[in-house]
Amino acid sequence: MKLSDSRVWMRAALLAVPVVVAQVGITRLQADAGVTVFSSAVAQEEKKPQRETRRTPALRNNVYEKLAEAQAAAEAKDLNTAASILDDMIDSGGRNALNSYELANVYNLYAFIHYSRENYAKALQAYENVVAQPDIPLAMEINTKYTIAQLYFVQEQWQQGIDALLDWFAVTDSPNANAYVLLAQGYYQTKDYDKALANVKKAIDMYVADGKIPKEQWYNLARFLYFEKNDVNNTVAVLEELLKYYPKKDYWVQLSHMYGEQKKEGKQLAAMDTAYVQDMLTKGTEQVTMAYLYLNAEVPYKAAKVMDKGLKNGSIDGTSKNYEITGSAWRQAQELDEAIVAMEEAAAKADDGELYARLGNIYLDGDQYKKAITAINKGLSRGGVKRPDTARLVLGMAYFNDKQYDKAREAFKAAGRDERSAKYSEQWLKYLESELERQEKLQES
């Protein structure tokens, strides 16, 4: 795998952002429904109008008792009984027998029943009926509008959810960070990335200002959005923040990639190495990338060690290519014995003769002339050698050092038929003849 190949799977990793819409938690008569919602606050900073004064009708005792009875049944998961009580309240005197506040509470409890049955469409309709009642308490209206927005998100009706949240923002005084994140997720789902980014940034800034650690998911959403905008510097900044609080393998790997995009090769290597020394890089592709980074930094010994360890423990696939990388790294590190072992494996697994030709070169470096001759001849006979002329030059050197001068001459002449090696072939042939002449004079003397 080349470093360019690693960018493909790295981009996939950067795009893999788990965005989870907050689940709706509906409690008894919406008492705890005041969860923070996403506001249009980033988009709407204008001063809200002064709140109206409302005269909410009283909740009569007989109605309260019936509601309490229905609520108790609902909390005991006897939903049919709870619904029957509410039906009787509606049917006994009709809706006109209940005032707006009483009717709002009936619909609120109906919504709880529908939600418990996972009938979100009916739950949503019931909550819409709650806010349709005039003169209900403002807190009840605010909480219900937030729950309506959540239910739209649960049903993946993103735009309706956004609109409902903005409606909620218009009536609430203190939206919290979770609300901004929910709105950001809605904009993310509708691919309005600029608004999504503005809202998730608002949530993160709110947490930081309060001395709290922003949630991992929030940083991930911001990271994704910056990456989509090709904002490399801010993508890096978010990843660095993530690693302060959530030091995970994926973030080290992604940060290494992004440092590479910034052409900060030293930091790129350091980030990946940090993950490697903590045994975080369990995938073969990650370990191979680590090896390439070491090679690019001219640290071949460490590259070879990474490859060798991965091949031995099975985390790196024992392919011809991976053994070739290992052999090349050992050779660059001047560890010829290890290079030979790795390249022998690479050549044996290859489909053509190229790696046998390269193996012959390593044998020659190690003064193993007969093995060099065998390997190069095997490679040439297999075919697929990228530079047969160069291979024949090396073959000629091996024959020469093994004192097989006639075969050396033949190999050099064959190499010289390619104009790319003609000059070197001529030089070697001259050297060969001068060496033979020198040896002849030595014998005469």
Image (cartoon, rainbow, N blue to C red):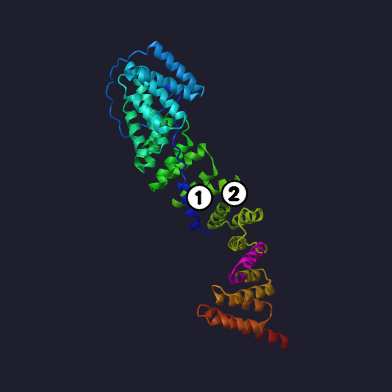
Residue 112: x and y, percent? Answer: 44, 26
Residue 110, located in which quarter of the rendered image? top left
**In front: 55, or 112?**
112
The percent coordinates of residue 185 (x first, y second) are 40, 38
Q: Is residue 420 magenta?
A: no
Q: Position of residue 321 (x, y in %)?
A: 58, 62
Residues tagged 2 and 1 counted as in contact (Cβ below 8 A):
no
| Residue type of the residue flagged with mark 2 | Thr
Could you say where residue 135 lies in the image, as x and y percent from the top left?
30, 19
- Tell me the number on the disc at residue 282: 2
Question: Which of the 4 quarters of the picture holds residue 108?
Answer: top left
Q: Residue at x 65, y 83 (%)?
A: 407
Task: Name the residue at the bottom extreme.
Answer: 444
Kindly state the secondary structure of the residue where label 1 is placed: helix
The residue stretch that appears in magenta: 338-357
Given residues 133 and 270, the one toward you in this image is 133
Please rate how many residues cluster around mark 1, counting C-alpha atoms within 10 Å: few if below 14, some from 14 to 19, many from 20.
Answer: many
Q: Which residue is mark 1?
A: 268
Name the residue furthest top. Answer: 61
- Residue 136 visible (yes or no): no
Instruction: Tell me which label, 2 or 1, sits earlier in the chain.
Output: 1
Q: For residue 45, what is the image quadrant?
A: top left
Give the Cα distance between marks 2 and 1. Answer: 18 Å
Left or right of residue 341: residue 152: left
Asked if residue 187 can be seen in this view, the reply is yes
* Residue 180 versus residue 234 in the image, above or below: above
Above or below, comparing residue 391 to residue 236 in the picture:
below
Quadrant of image for the C terminus: bottom right
Seen from the viewer's position, the closer of residues 126 and 195 is 126
Q: Is residue 349 magenta?
A: yes
Sort mark 2 into few (<14), some (14-19) or many (20+) by Cα contacts within 10 Å: some
Amino acid type shown at disc 1: Gln
